[in-house]
C-alpha cells in the first residue's frame, strides 16, 4: 500500500477513536425495570424515548423486565412503555444529562389491560348446595407434568363467591378450597380473554360435624 494511503488510513482511525469517546461524553442514557402491579418484571416490554413528538430511540426489556437506552442527546424526554396485555404507560419530562445514565429503578409500572384479561368467577358450596362464606381458596397453575405452582390465596365473600384475573393465555388453574379442615379442588382450563365460571364442592353438608 502507498505511503500516502497508509497515512490517510491512520488519520481516519485516529479521528474515529477521538470522536467515539467525545460522542459518549456528550450524550446520555437511561435504564430501569418495567414491572406489573405485583412487582414482577414484564419481559419484552417496549420502551420508546420520545422528544418533540418524535420517536428517538427504543429498547426491549429483558426477561426480567430490565432495559437500557444510550446515545440520547441532553434534554427532556417522554418515555412510552408498552407490553402485550397491559395498558400503555408514559413517564413524562425525564431529564437526560451529558455523560450520565439516569436510573429509573423499578418506577415503571404497567396495569393490566382488562380487555385482555382472563376473568374467573367461582363459588364454594357444601354438598347440600348452600354456599360457604369465609372459605380459603388457594389458586395454583398446573404445569405440563401435573405439578402445581401456587399463585395466590383468596377468601370467599358472604355468598361464597370469589374472583380471579390473569393476563390472557392458555393455562389450567387449580382452585383448592379449605374450610375447617375440609378440602376439595377443581381444575379449570382457559385459552383466551373471557369470563369463565367454576365451583368447588366441599364433601360435607352445612352444619355437619367436620372430621
Image: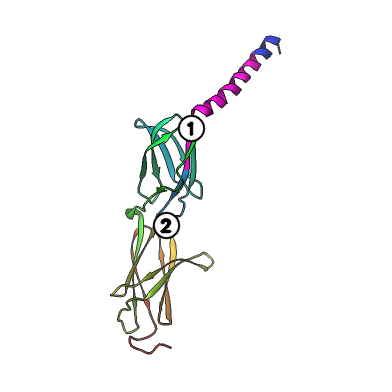
Quick check: marks 2 and 1 in contact, CB under 8 Å? no
> Residue 85, how many percent across, how many down?
38, 51
Q: Is residue 49 magenta?
A: no
Name the residue that disc number 1 marks: 28
What's the magenta region?
Answer: 8-31
Q: CA distance from mark 2 to mark 1?
A: 31 Å
Between 101 and 203, the one lying in front of the other is 101
Question: What kind of element bears circle 2?
Answer: loop
Q: Name the disc covering residue 55, or none.
A: none
Q: Quadrant of residue 78?
A: top left
Answer with mark 2 or mark 1, whichever residue precedes in sequence: 1
> Residue 13, how many percent across, how many down?
63, 20
- Few, some or many C-alpha atoms within 10 Å of disc 2 (few <14, some 14-19, many ≥20)? few
Question: What kind of element bears circle 1?
Answer: strand
Q: In this picture, is 188 found above or below 46?
A: below
Residue at the far left: name it: 159
> Residue 11, how many percent across, how many down?
63, 15
Name the residue that disc number 2 marks: 38
Q: How many marks?
A: 2
Q: Is residue 129 left or right of residue 75?
A: left
Q: Quadrant of residue 193?
A: bottom left
- Few, some or many C-alpha atoms within 10 Å of disc 1 (few <14, some 14-19, many ≥20)? many
Q: In this picture, is 68 found above or below 188?
A: above
Q: Select label 2 or label 1 by which is in front.
A: 1
> Residue 160, how many percent across, how many down?
31, 75
Which residue is at a point 52% across and 68% down the rendered structure image? 147
Between 29 and 208, the one lying in front of the other is 29
Amino acid at each position: 500500500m502507498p505511503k500516502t494511503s497508509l497515512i490517510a488510513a491512520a488519520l481516519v482511525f485516529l479521528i474515529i477513536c477521538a470522536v467515539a469517546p467525545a460522542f459518549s461524553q456528550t450524550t446520555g442514557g437511561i435504564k430501569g425495570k418495567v414491572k406489573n402491579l405485583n412487582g414482577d418484571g414484564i419481559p419484552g416490554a417496549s420502551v420508546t424515548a420520545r422528544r418533540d413528538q418524535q420517536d428517538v430511540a427504543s429498547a426491549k426489556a429483558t426477561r426480567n423486565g430490565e432495559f437500557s437506552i444510550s446515545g440520547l442527546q441532553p434534554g427532556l424526554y417522554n418515555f412510552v412503555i408498552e407490553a402485550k396485555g397491559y395498558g400503555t404507560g408514559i413517564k413524562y419530562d425525564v431529564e437526560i444529562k451529558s455523560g450520565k445514565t439516569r436510573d429509573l429503578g423499578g418506577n415503571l409500572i404497567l396495569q393490566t389491560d382488562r380487555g385482555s384479561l382472563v376473568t374467573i368467577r367461582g363459588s364454594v358450596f357444601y354438598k347440600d348446595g348452600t354456599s360457604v362464606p369465609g372459605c380459603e381458596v388457594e389458586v395454583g397453575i398446573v404445569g405440563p407434568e401435573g405439578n402445581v405452582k401456587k399463585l395466590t390465596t383468596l377468601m370467599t365473600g358472604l355468598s361464597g363467591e370469589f374472583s380471579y384475573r390473569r393476563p390472557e393465555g392458555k393455562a389450567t388453574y387449580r382452585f383448592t378450597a379449605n374450610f375447617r379442615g375440609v378440602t376439595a379442588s377443581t381444575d379449570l382450563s382457559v385459552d383466551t380473554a373471557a369470563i369463565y365460571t367454576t365451583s368447588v364442592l366441599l364433601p360435607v353438608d352445612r352444619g355437619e360435624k367436620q372430621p
